[in-house]
Image (tube, helix red, strand yellow):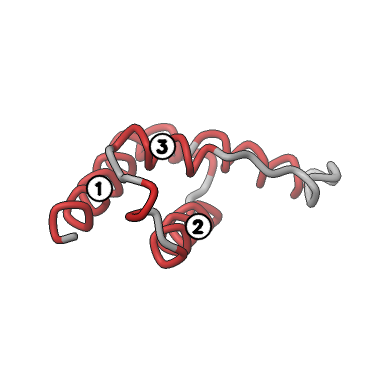
Amino acid sequence: MRNVKLIQGLGNAGALVEHFYSDLSVVILKLIGFDDDQRTDALYALYDTKMHALVDVSVEVFREKLPYLAVDFYNELLLLKISG
């Protein structure tokens, strides 16, 4: 989440970030335990949607809200994993 917020901030400041891409979503979903066949396009779309929603969180409160945002998203991913 911090990485996404940083890239968004750099882009807003005028840095050329449109060609930047990281595979953090793959790493994070693997660490949570999603197997290759469970990491569907829909799962990546959900991940991307959640990350893009961070645009709406102001920098002033981002640091304070980060633990809650992370836990909420983690729990949502775990529910998806459990429900198969």
**Nearer-the-camera pick, 34 or 77:** 34
Q: Which residue is mark 1?
A: 72
Image quadrant for the C terminus? bottom left
- Farthest residue toward the bottom? 42
Residue 29 in picture, x, y percent from top left: 38, 42
Q: Residue at x 35, y 40 (%)?
A: 65
Q: Position of residue 56 (x, y in %)?
A: 51, 58
Q: Can you say whether 33 is above or below 12 in the image?
A: above
Q: Which residue is mark 2?
A: 48
The x, y position of residue 80, in whole percent, is 22, 58
Marks 1 & 2, CB-CB < 8 Å contact: no
User: Element under label 3?
Assistant: helix
First of labels 3, 2 by sequence position: 3
Alpha carbon distance from label 3 to label 1: 15 Å
Image point (54%, 41%), residue name: 59
Q: Nearer the viewer, mark 3 or mark 2?
A: 3
Query: Residue drawn at (63%, 39%), measured in percent from left and top?
Result: 22
- Tell me which residue sits at (74%, 43%) in the image: 20
The three-letter code of the residue at mark 1 reads: Asp
First-in-chain label (1 vs 2): 2
Disc 3/disc 2 C-alpha distance (Å): 12 Å
Q: Secondary structure at mark 1?
A: helix
Identify the amino acid type marked 2. Asp
Secondary element type, mark 2 = helix
Left or right placement of residue 20 versus residue 2 in this view: right
Which residue matches tag 3? Answer: 28
| Residue 34, above or below 55 | above
Q: Is residue 30 above or below residue 49?
A: above
Q: Identify which amino acid the numbered label 3 is placed on.
A: Ile
The mark tally for this picture is: 3
